[in-house]
Amino acid sequence: ETGVTQSPTHLIKTRGQQVTLRCSSQSGHNTVSWYQQALGQGPQFIFQYYREEENGRGNFPPRFSGLQFPNYSSELNVNALELDDSALYLCASSQGIFTYGYTFGSGTRLTVV
Amino acid sequence: QKEVEQDPGPLSVPEGAIVSLNCTYSNSAFQYFMWYRQYSRKGPELLMYTYSSGNKEDGRFTAQVDKSSKYISLFIRDSQPSDSATYLCAMSELGNEKLTFGTGTRLTIIP
């Protein structure tokens, strides 16, 4: 059974650019949640996707958007990057919406310069 | 005021000691309480999960929830160097998919 895999592991972008982060969920999991973890902080909820539909969203602007594909993999897109977007972006998968057995990936470290 | 408060540490204790980690919260709607462990350059790993008040034990780990005081704790007995990591508390409301995390406590176990 594979875990949650995220790609890329690191990347550097320039302010104003756009970025796409990818996540493959754990086998058997149909729900994907994305979190942003700034340095020295706990993860903050961005949004969740269940069966290809956005199921809930945290306090993030519309330039943060996502997709979930039929195989339950997911993408996080961020437009018009700002310096404060520099963070570790974590993907978590689960079986169902209201289960608390999330499995997190190792994250993508995004640096905006 | 943050919904979940957690002392960031760092906390250093000798090997074999009992470690106590704590979080307080302000949202009385929180019903699910979790502790995650996060090693450097890794994602959080679920350690303990508790619903409502009470205690839960799993090996060397004990989680306690006191909803009347809005206070949760994680105890680690016979601490090992491999326990050195950042410990995050997380909470959720019933029927809400969002986890609200504390800032994490960085723990070092000294051999």
Image (cartoon, coloured by chain):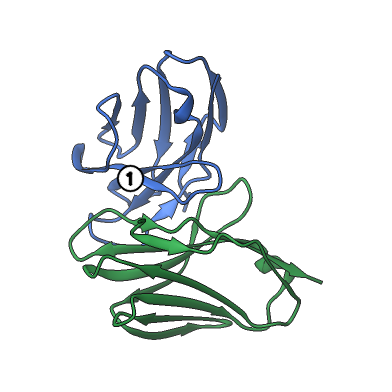
Chain colours: A blue, B green
- Quadrant placement of the C terminus of chain A: top right
> Within the image, what quadrant is residue A96 found in?
bottom left
Query: Is A76 placed left or right of B47 in the picture?
Result: left
Residue B81 visible somewhere in the drawing:
yes
- Residue displayed at 42% across by 54% down: A103
**SS class of the residue under badge 1?**
strand
> How far across and how far down the image is residue A102, in percent?
38, 57
- Residue displayed at 53% across by 45% down: A106
Residue A100 visible somewhere in the drawing:
no
How many marks do you count on the picture? 1
The residue indicated by pointer 1 is A33
> How far across and how far down the image is residue A110, in percent?
52, 29
Query: Is A52 placed left or right of A3 in the picture?
Result: left
Q: A29 or B74, which is in the foreground?
A: B74
Q: Up-down: is B48 above or below A47? A: below
> How far across and how far down the image is residue B62, in percent?
50, 82
- Residue displayed at 73% across by 82% down: B16
Assess disc 1: are there few (<14), some (14-19) or many (≥20) residues with their C-alpha within 10 Å of its C-alpha: many
Q: Up-down: is B110 above or below B61? A: above
Residue type indicated by callout 1 = Ser
> Within the image, what quadrant is residue B15 found in?
bottom right
Q: A76 or A40, which is in the foreground?
A: A40
Q: B82 or B91, which is in the foreground?
A: B91
Query: Is A17 placed left or right of B93 in the picture?
Result: right
Most extreme residue toward the right is: B111
- Residue displayed at 20% across by 38% down: A54
| Chain under numbered label 1 | A
Q: Up-down: is A86 above or below B50? A: above
